[in-house]
Amino acid sequence: MQLLQKLRDSSNIESIKVEVNEIESYVRRELVSPLNTFLTQCKGSIIVYSYTGYGYIPASILYWYYLTMSSSKYPLLMEAEDTAIYMAPYREDFSTLILSTGEYSRLISALQGIRILGIEYKAITPQPSDERLRFLLKHYDVYTIPYRNIVEAVLALAMGSVITASNMYRSHLTTRGQRLFQHASEGFSTVLESLIEKYIPILERVLNQREIIVSSSRFLDASSKLLSYTLRRIGIVSKYVSLEEAIELDEPVLMISLSVEERAKREFIATSRSPIIELVLNTDPLEASIYIVLIAYTLYRSSNL
């Protein structure tokens, strides 16, 4: 069955919903508590959301939540090795949460410097198959999750980030915090079917391309990069570039934007030379990234079921 047919097949979507629900159940049972404990108890005036690889996506979700909702600490978003090299030797007043999708050499390199300098940290990554790596991760007190596939790992970590952050900030910004918490509490599998149904005309156009550029605003670049990665995994030549770079290109562009970014979208469309496919998310900006991750996961699993 062709991929587009699978996206329109209710039994396929139902199977993916079951998988999403199983991952979410694991996240709520095993991952949310260590995330919440670290983020509510970590010391210092700065919280650094560090990452390796596509851990950039859940780290970015937490960063934007914290930047929007809280003023108790100053948030930073940095690659883990940058945190170890450029910040840890010179600052003591921070803690760091490191989210990784299995780039073990970079993760361990960062942890060596961070631990030697006495920086408080929590690191989370997929469980490796190599026994020596498992020993090293245990030595550095790394929390491991059972999802080695990058798209699955990102989904689990992104769910954990959204659930944890929405619970932490449920009383912030009056009704906004409560609304975000309620949406996260309802579960992610419940929105999957309507999400795919809404965007399937756009996905159909994307999947009919042999080559496509994925682009977005800075706010959505992390999750948009995962979507570009997923397109490559299912056989489409794709790369992510910023809107500023995409405007100079001639290839078809999938432009991912929020409804609140209308001015930037109009400006890009008016000046771009490329054929443009628009994917506009009409939702709270803090929820948008997890929806893009869900779309990427659905594409990936539909191509493999």
Image (cartoon, helix red, strand yellow):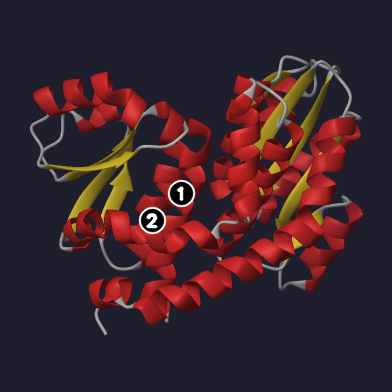
Q: Position of residue 80 (x, y in %)?
A: 67, 37
Q: Which residue is mark 1?
A: 291
126 sits left or right of 176 in the view: right
Instruction: Please tell me whether mark 2 or mark 1 is closer to you in this view.
Output: 2
Query: 263 or 198: which is nearer to us?
Result: 198
Q: Which residue is mark 2?
A: 195
Q: Is residue 235 visible?
A: yes
Helix, strand or loop at disc 2? Answer: helix
Which image quarter: residue 92? top right
Query: 118 or 2: which is nearer to us?
Result: 2
User: In which quadrant of the rendered image does the C terminus lie?
Assistant: bottom left
User: In which quadrant of the rendered image does the N terminus lie?
Assistant: bottom left
Q: Is residue 106 visible?
A: no
Type of residue at label 2? Leu
Q: Which mark is residue 65?
A: none
Type of residue at label 1? Tyr
> Height in image: 46 above or below 226?
above
Q: For mark 1, does the 10 Å Cα neighbourhood hold few (<14), some (14 to 19), or many (20 or more) residues?
A: some
Q: Earlier in the sequence, mark 2 or mark 1?
A: 2
Query: Residue at 18% of width from left, 28% of height from top?
Result: 247
Disc 2 and disc 1 in contact, CB within 8 angstroms: yes
161 sits left or right of 261 in the view: right
Q: Position of residue 152 (x, y in %)?
A: 56, 63
Query: 237 or 220: which is nearer to us?
Result: 220
Q: Position of residue 212 (x, y in %)?
A: 21, 50
Which image quarter: residue 71? top right
Helix, strand or loop at disc 1? Answer: helix
